[in-house]
Image: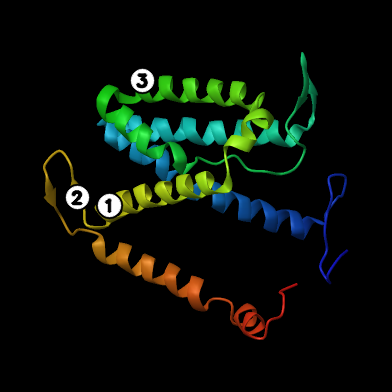
Amino acid sequence: MGSGRLRYDLESHPPLPVLIGSVAQHMGLMAVTLVFPLLVAQAAGVDAEMQRRYLDLAMLAMGVATLFQCWGRPILFLPRTGCGYLLPAVFTAAYLPAALYAARAGGLEAVAGMTIAAGLAEVLFSRVMHRVRPFLPIEIVGLVVMLIGIILGVVAIKLMVGYSQSMAQVTLTGTGGAVAGLAVMIALAAWGSPASTAMARRGQKCP
């Protein structure tokens, strides 16, 4: 226990209500990122049935990856698999622009090849990350994150206004709902935590 709140470590056994709440929170977080494979499948031009199967495989991949991450013990010939914590696997926005381009150029097959190549590159790069870290200052990391946000913002605006690249036209169907959702997110981010805002104004730290 610290700062007036419970804290659970790797070997803790939280009560059932805490576990249920944590599972619901993580499931919601994972479900939100399913929009990325859906956009990729739509960019590939596949039919609705293939999109459904693609999302089925995406959910299966998230579940298997989460189990591996939570295992935290040796498996087969590997010294250790995962960290042991409940860290849900989600689809990252960092690969979305490249995946959309690959989907339009070569379909879902090209996306699969790109994903495999990117995963192998990450595995290999992780072995030498500690050596190249001095050459990757925080400014570079911030620039990359900013560029990802800009790219995602462009994609989001196109979806909000119903822009179709194939027909080069704008259809405003569903734009009202998208704008309303954006307004709710902005309002919650700006005014969603009065206690934290008041503490920040008084120069106090939130617990």
- Callout 3 touching callout 2 (CB < 8 Å): no
Residue visible at 44% across and 67% down in the picture: 185
Q: Amino acid at mark 3?
A: Glu
Single out the residue that lies furthest toward the front.
135
Q: Is residue 80 left or right of residue 95?
A: right
Residue 13: percent from left, percent from top: 86, 50
Q: Amino acid at mark 2?
A: Tyr
Instruction: Using the numbered discs, state the Cα–Cα distance from disc 3 to disc 1 in whole angstroms.
Output: 24 Å
Mark toward the start of the polypeptide (3 vs 1): 3
Residue at the spot of label 1 = 159
Q: Which element is circle 1 on?
A: helix
- Indicate the quadrant containing the N terminus: top left, top right, bottom left or bottom right: bottom right
Residue at the spot of label 2 = 163
Q: Which element is circle 3 on?
A: helix
Q: Amino acid at mark 1?
A: Leu
Residue visible at 45% across and 43% down in the picture: 93
Instruction: Using the numbered discs, state the Cα–Cα distance from disc 2 to disc 1 in whole angstroms.
Output: 6 Å
Q: Quadrant of residue 112?
A: top left
Q: Is residue 23 left or right of residue 174?
A: right
Q: Is residue 92 left or right of residue 11?
A: left
Residue visible at 73% across and 32% down in the picture: 82
Q: Which element is circle 2 on?
A: strand
Residue at the spot of label 3 = 109
Instruction: Using the numbered discs, state the Cα–Cα distance from disc 3 to disc 2 in whole angstroms.
Output: 25 Å
Q: Camera-side residue: 7 or 93?
A: 93
- For label 3, the crowd category at 10 Å Cα-Cα, with few meaning under 14, some 14 to 19 and many 20 or more, is few
